[in-house]
Image (tube, rainbow, N blue to C red):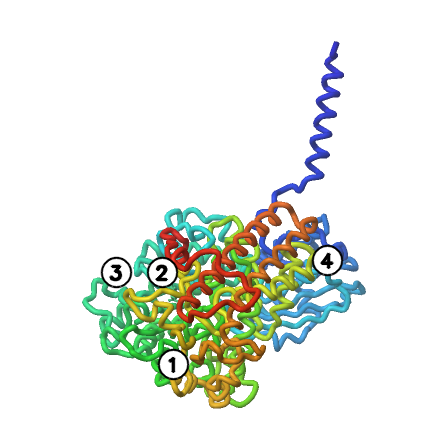
Amino acid sequence: MLTVSTALRAVFAGLCLLAAGLAAAPALAEDGYELWLRYRPATHARAVTELVAAAATPAQAAARAELLRGLAGMSGHRPPLSDTVTRTGAVIVGTAASSPVVARLRLDTADLGREGYLIRSVVVDGYAATIIAANEDIGALYGAFHFLRLLQTGQTLDDLDVLEAPKVQLRVLDHWDNLDRFVERGYAGASIWDWHKLPDWRDPRYTDYARANASVGINGAVLNNVNANALILAPMYLEKVAALADVFRPWGIRIYLSARFSAPIEIGGLQTADPLDPTVRRWWRDKADEIYRHVPDFGGFLVKANSEGQPGPQDYGRSHADGANMLAEALAAHGGVVMWRAFVYSNEQPDDRAKQAYSEFVPLDGKFRDNVLVQVKNGAIDFQPREPFHPLFGAMPRTPLMMEFQITKEYLGFATHLAYLGPLYEETLRADTRARGEGSTVAKVIDGSLHADNLPGGAPTGMAGVANIGADRNWSGSHFDQANWYAFGRLAWNPQLSSQAIAGDWVRMTFSNDSAFVRPVVDMMMASREAVVDYMTPLGLHHLMGRGHHYGPGPWIAGGPRADWTSVYYHRADEDGIGFDRSATGSDAVAQYALPVAQIFGDAERVPEKFLLWFHHLPWDHDTRSGRTLWHELVHRYTRGVDTVMRMRATWDGLKGHVDAERHAQVAAFLTIQHKEAHWWRDASIAYWQRINGLPLPPGETPPPRPLEYYESLEFPYAPGGG
Ligand code: GCW
């Protein structure tokens, strides 16, 4: 018979088994929510024995809380807090104003500016310690994140001597989020801004968003889509915006808004939005004053004007400078800036779309107010898998030009294709404009150094990334897309960084420090964007995707409302050849580049092959550098892209034991989708080109498994993100 005590013993034993089982399994499923701030056990974290950190301001409290959280996670215990250094292994964080210890050390912080920091191994009162010091609280916060990164990536705390200051002032995420929570070109679910519940419900996720941004140095966020709804500027929304600004402030993030140029008519009841009309100017001044009453550190406006149907100054016969300067004047008194986009092109304009932004903006160089930045996409068309650098870089020496990259992968397979964009960003930033001789890189245009002598002192500098963030649990729609957010932030802080080194840091923090894992994964990431170029748009081809939603191949797209939204406009293929002639014999877009660059791009024999068909229309039997004909080379590259994805799958499958099952499984499933879709791109493209050129496949190449009509018939009315 079972006595009470044996029954109790059995229950107890069962509980123990359960507890043991629980302990063996990870406490929480890895769903990607923690991003690169996972703070799992790290070898050298135990070297930290105490934390000397004030929390007298929200930013100080943020830094202290993050250090405690990170150190507790990585070392298994929360280090004690102390006002003074009492033992070896102390970490001191702060400014001369916040920390008597920092003040006493009399560090030379002249080069750090407002946001910079230093991290140094020091001896304080006879104890070996680490100091994280800055001029302002925000610098100390950035330093705290850097210090945590050192531990997360397995580095020791010996002999530290780090000095960092951002090279670019405005490091901004552009959210293309609508007020109804639809995210244009978003592949990570709905908008994270829950406008309906704001301002009263401040989702804790907003704080995690700010933490993640601060950890990579992002210091601004444009909350709403550039295809803007004027309502964001109405009082009801400004209260909501103010609530978000309050959450972001301790983390050094300023809010910006996309301003709709016709807002004075739509929400102001005026008859016109003419930028030279005094009532319109007054309206914007009052609106700016009202915004600053809600958000005293408001960053400014981002504007898409006279582009793709958006209203703008040209509706009134005024220039982009007239429009930008009116808004800049309204913001100037408060220290705000205008980020005026150069993404303009018109279907009515017979000229090559790639030339239009340059043609419109170069004559305006020097005509913008000091607090205007012209925001230029990395290339002249539209965030394609590969584009040559935009000819505006280097061509407006008297205007601060801000970079606009796309982090969301509108043209690189949405969320399910693994494409690490670090190499894309790096390729553009390192491109040499030759505007002032050799070494005139795009990075130097962006950080303001190339034209420092032409620009007014203290001219703003900036880099924007179109965010890939949504309400999905993993933020970015896929685990690997988090790397693109991360890499954007790191490169905005320092455009000279190597994308490979950034990938290494990200992999270590996000997955594992095990070099048997890190090496193959970084290699896979570094090859991934090139694979996408190969299977979608090899050899400089561009804009060949499905209409509207931009999902999947559509080289056959023709007709419809605008020629410059078709594929045939860009590839110009016929039975004789393929490619867009932008050389002197064609649209002469090459002439918009500095002469040495124009000469190279304009010469089919010298142009880098990756841009061949961007600049040249060539016969199908043109000899390429491999010795293959152009047609054979194209097919070769399509197939190479598919094969690379196949190898990525194999690499990832082989790493199963190194990463938690949840994330491993999703990445594996997405790679399977990518492989299937890479094939689809290759097959559909080859089938289409063959219909045009009538040429047989090179020997050994597998023919597309379906007729062209099949690929052309596919429709995706509910593909995500459609604009
Ligand atoms: O890339 C295109 C997108 C549009 C976008 C536009 C822009 C916000 O397809 O969705 O609109 O560029 O950058 O303004």
For marks 1 and 3, give the CA distance.
33 Å
Taking 409 as reference, is 700 left or right?
A: right
Q: Which residue is mark 1?
A: 358
Taking 234 as reference, is 596 left or right?
A: right
Mark nearer the viewer, 4 or 3: 4
Q: Secondary structure at mark 2?
A: loop
Mark nearer the viewer, 3 or 2: 2
Residue 465 percent location from the top left of the image: 48, 66
Which sits earlier in the primary sequence, circle 4 or circle 3? 3
Q: Which residue is mark 3?
A: 267
Quarter where residue 429 is shown:
bottom right
In the rendered structure, which amino acid carries the disc numbered 2? Gly
Please rate how many residues cluster around mark 3, counting C-alpha atoms within 10 Å: few if below 14, some from 14 to 19, many from 20: few
Which sits earlier in the primary sequence, circle 1 or circle 2? 1
Q: Which quadrant of the frame does ligand 1 lie within?
A: bottom left
Between 499 and 193, the residue placed more toward the observer is 499
In the rendered structure, which amino acid carries the disc numbered 4? Ala
Q: Secondary structure at mark 3?
A: loop
Q: Secondary structure at mark 4?
A: helix
Specify the label residue 324 is tagged with.
none
Quarter where residue 287 is shown:
bottom left
- Rendered view: 376 above or below 409: below
Which sits earlier in the primary sequence, circle 4 or circle 1? 1
